[in-house]
Image (cartoon, rainbow, N blue to C red):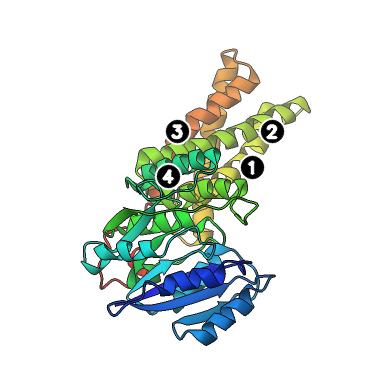
């Protein structure tokens, strides 16, 4: 058996050599190693340390990114070059213990699993006590991810993952930074392979010690959970996300309507000028958060068909708004009610006809191309 260990590295000159030493310790007569260090254009001596390790150990290879792109991009580069039976990710900062990789590989070797995730919350091993709000955010993101993937994971953001090589080679990684974690969980979940989770030890770092993930990455993780899960989520979850997008569009529609009405334009012209950007916003939010883009139609055909549907919705919206105005409702409330009553039936039109759900099915070993699940 050969395990490819991908080590993304950015400014880790103080820990990289020790990290690789620990990874090398798990090699034995039954397990060969391929260690791929991917330097993400470090500004310290990380690359020099990596090159020195490469010259000392035949198991070590070094790849260098042409520019700094983030952990996700570095991991994707390493995945593409991996040749082992199994592929794992090992951060260079010593937060994870490589000895746990051997335990994580057991379900894979015994052909019980196709993917094994490490969990910092299942283990009885040593854990460094650190940030409460980080932990709370992790619980929230894991719970939200589980809602969409229908998995019962305990640690979606864990940096320890081991895959069968054909699994990870069949996935196109799009996220450049820490959004890689929710993206890979989502894409693996929709392939429906056999997934296991095993408790691991965790020696977290403080920001003073070099921890890099921050609040912006948490927001990106939230976006990635929606982006990579919603197109294949059950209709009620899609509807919830669509209502969120529709609520934003409704506020835009209402604000512009009141602005144009206040400037002296009539209700019909004001409705049109307000509805058009709101409909465009629903389209943009829809293809980024809720639906899959270009599944049934080309991009141009999709826009044309959506425009026809939006024009029909505008006519209905105009009629409903006018009716509410006749019955004495204020222009603002009439416009808001008209938009809401159009938004709800607009969802099944979008989901069924314009943005149909992509085909999905269980992963099988012979399905090794990216088109097997996409």
CA–CA distance in space, label 1 to label 3: 18 Å
Mark 1: few/some/many CA within 10 Å (<14, 14-19, 20+) = some
Mark 4: few/some/many CA within 10 Å (<14, 14-19, 20+) = many
Query: Percent from the top left, x then y, of residue 320?
Result: 53, 25
The one of 281 and 31 positioned closer to us in this rendering = 31
Q: Mark 1 or mark 2: which comes first in sequence?
A: 2
Q: Mark 2 or mark 3: which comes first in sequence?
A: 2
Mark 3: few/some/many CA within 10 Å (<14, 14-19, 20+) = some
- Residue in the picture at 57% in, 59% down: 177
Q: Mark 4 or mark 2: which comes first in sequence?
A: 4
Mark 2: few/some/many CA within 10 Å (<14, 14-19, 20+) = many
CA–CA distance in space, label 1 to label 2: 9 Å
The one of 62 and 309 positioned closer to us in this rendering = 62
Query: Percent from the top left, x then y, of residue 198?
Result: 32, 54
Query: Percent from the top left, x then y, of residue 298?
Result: 48, 62
Q: Which mark identifies residue 256?
A: 2
Q: Which residue is mark 4?
A: 142
Evaluate if marks 4 and 1 touch, with contact meaning CB atoms under 8 Å apart: no
Q: Mark 4 or mark 1: which comes first in sequence?
A: 4
Q: Mark 1 or mark 3: which comes first in sequence?
A: 1
CA–CA distance in space, label 2 to label 3: 21 Å
Would you identify the image quadrant in which residue 191 lies? bottom left
Evaluate if marks 1 and 2 touch, with contact meaning CB atoms under 8 Å apart: yes
Evaluate if marks 1 and 3 touch, with contact meaning CB atoms under 8 Å apart: no
- Residue in the picture at 63% in, 51% down: 207
Query: Percent from the top left, x then y, of residue 220?
Result: 56, 50
**What secondary structure is marked by label 1?**
helix
């Amino acid at each position: 058996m050969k395990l490819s260990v991908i080590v993304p590295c950015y400014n880790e000159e103080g820990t990289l050599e020790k990290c690789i030493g620990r990874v090398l310790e798990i090699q034995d007569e039954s397990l060969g190693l391929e260690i791929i260090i991917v330097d993400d254009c470090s500004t310290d001596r990380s690359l020099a340390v990596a090159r020195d390790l490469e010259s000392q150990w035949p198991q070590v290879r070094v790849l260098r990114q042409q520019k700094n792109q983030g952990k996700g991009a570095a991991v994707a580069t390493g995945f593409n070059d991996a040749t082992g039976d199994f592929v794992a990710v090992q951060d260079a900062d010593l937060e994870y213990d490589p000895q746990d990789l051997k335990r994580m590989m057991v379900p894979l070797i015994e052909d019980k699993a196709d993917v094994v995730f490490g969990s910092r919350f299942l283990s009885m091993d040593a854990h460094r006590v650190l940030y409460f709000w980080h932990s709370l955010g992790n619980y929230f993101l894991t719970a939200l991810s589980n809602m969409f993937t229908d998995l019962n994971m305990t640690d979606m953001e864990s940096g320890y993952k081991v895959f069968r090589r054909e699994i990870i080679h069949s996935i196109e990684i799009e996220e450049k930074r820490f959004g890689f974690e929710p993206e890979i969980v989502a894409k693996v979940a929709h392939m429906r392979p056999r997934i296991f989770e095993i408790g691991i030890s965790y020696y977290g770092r403080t920001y003073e010690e070099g921890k890099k993930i921050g609040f912006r990455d948490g927001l990106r993780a939230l976006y990635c959970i929606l982006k990579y899960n919603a197109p294949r989520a059950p209709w009620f979850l899609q509807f919830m996300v669509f209502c969120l997008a529709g609520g934003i569009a409704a506020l835009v529609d209402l604000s512009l309507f009141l602005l144009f009405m206040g400037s002296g334009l009539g209700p019909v012209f004001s409705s049109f000028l307000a509805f058009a950007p709101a409909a465009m916003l629903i389209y943009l939010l829809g293809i980024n958060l809720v639906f899959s883009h270009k599944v049934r139609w080309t991009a141009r055909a999709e826009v044309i068909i959506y425009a026809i549907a939006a024009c029909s919705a505008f006519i209905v919206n105009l009629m409903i708004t006018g009716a509410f105005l006749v019955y004495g409702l204020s222009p603002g409330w009439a416009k808001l009610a008209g938009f809401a009553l159009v938004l709800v039936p607009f969802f099944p039109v979008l989901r069924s006809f314009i943005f149909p759900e992509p085909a999905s099915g269980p992963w099988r070993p012979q399905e090794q191309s990216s088109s097997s699940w996409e």
